[in-house]
Image (cartoon, rainbow, N blue to C red):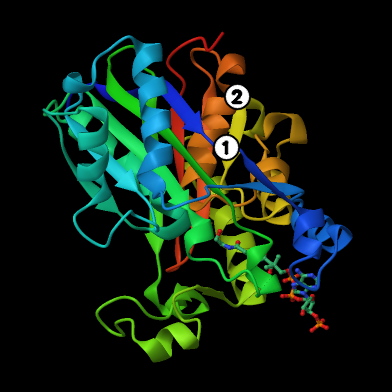
Amino acid sequence: MTNIRAAITAVGGYVPDYVLTNKELETMVDTTDDWITSRTGIKERRILKGERGSTEMAKEAVEQLLNKRGIGPEEIDLVIYCSVTPDLIFPASANILSDKVGMVNAFGYDLNAACSGFIYGLTTGSKFIETGVYKKVLVVGADKMSSIIDYTDRATCIIFGDGAGAVLLEPDDSGNGVMDAILRSDGAGREFLYQKSGGSQRPPTEETVKNREHYVYQEGKTVFKFAVSKMADVSYEVMERNKLTGEDIAWLVPHQANLRIIDATANRMGLSTEKVMINIQKYGNTTNGTIPLCLHEWENQLKKGDNLILSAFGGGFTWGAVYLRWAYDGA
Ligand code: UT7
């Protein structure tokens, strides 16, 4: 084993301009700003209008990242595109994005682990760096959730929004970078949060479209019950395994699905709210976008050596937590 770790050396983020507020949702479905705010913590979310896929947002995030790092797109070796809303079922959006940005020397692939996709991507991407095979790995989390949301279903349309974030992984031998990760999945949970048709099991037909099966279906209460315990448990487990206490943690970077799930996770870890990145009120649940968008927003406050725990829970079920030591002074 070498002592090379994969460090995040740059971040980028993008959300579309259109703001869909709780007030506007009140005019679309039978709901209230009060209900949404108290049950989820969300006040508004962003929507990408027009015939544009998730790679359009990812492109903005990646170009910003490359600019900040001062490198060209041709220097990227590998692109991992984490999304449940790729532009097309195939070819992979990693390819489409590489073409749009000019990452001509990169290969890439799409990764689907629902809301846990970004931490799965970060963990697998870090292995290519640790082995010394690649020097610059881009992990993108991008979702245009509005493309698969039923805006007549009040139980799901209030939660999700669109957005994208990206991080660059590079080798680090100074003790910073991705330190540990615990990733889990349980396919028995697949029927509680999924898209009923569109895949090979049930390809789209006039009937599936009429039944609105191409939209997200969620049994919210069941998902909530699992999310609240699994995300808190795995975050605590990764701390314990690395002998960390709440005192040692600078930031919790949680997937933004529901403020109550975030609070439960922070409580379990013994963290006060000031140490938790929360922007769910502005963006809702952007699925793969949530965690990199938080890193992007808090970048200026991050310091070299800060201990971060990233954790998520999502459809599948999938969940996990990553422990990483931040590698540069954000300011
Ligand atoms: O990121 C991927 C993982 N996803 C999650 O982590 C989401 C987890 N689930 C949740 O966050 C919550 O379950 C929701 C926010 C989706 C729903 O909150 P809840 O407290 O679990 O509500 P519920 O589904 O149990 O519904 C309670 C009541 C129901 O009415 P009755 O049957 O008690 O009369 C719903 O019909 O609230 C009603 N309801 C609404 N009322 C006003 C459901 N959605 C709405 C709404 N506005 N938008």
Q: Residues within 10 Å of mark 1 (few under 14, many from 20)?
A: many
- Asked if the residue at tag 1 contacts the one at tag 2, i.e. Cβ–Cβ closer than 8 Å, the answer is yes
As drawn, the label of residue 70 is none
Q: Is mark 2 within 8 Å of ligand 1?
A: no
Q: Residue at x 44, y 30 (%)?
A: 324
Q: Is residue 234 above or below residue 168?
A: below
Q: Residues within 10 Å of mark 2 (few under 14, many from 20)?
A: some
Q: Nearer the viewer, mark 2 or mark 1?
A: 2
255, 17: nearer the viewer: 17
Q: Residue 180 location, x and y as percent? A: 38, 37
Q: Residue 92 location, x and y as percent? A: 22, 52
Q: In the rendered structure, which amino acid carries the disc numbered 2?
A: Trp
Q: Is residue 100 above or below residue 176?
A: below
Name the residue that disc number 2 marks.
298
Asked whether the viewer can see residue 20, the reply is yes
Q: Residue 228 location, x and y as percent? A: 64, 61
Q: Is residue 171 above or below residue 90?
A: above
Q: Is residue 204 left or right of residue 218?
A: left
Q: Residue at x 56, y 55 (%)?
A: 231
Give the farthest residue toward the bottom.
207
- Tell me how far mark 2 sits from mark 1, CA to CA: 10 Å
Q: In the rendered structure, which amino acid carries the disc numbered 1?
A: Val
Name the residue that disc number 1 marks.
253
Q: Residue 238 location, x and y as percent? A: 48, 43
Q: Residue at x 67, y 38 (%)?
A: 279
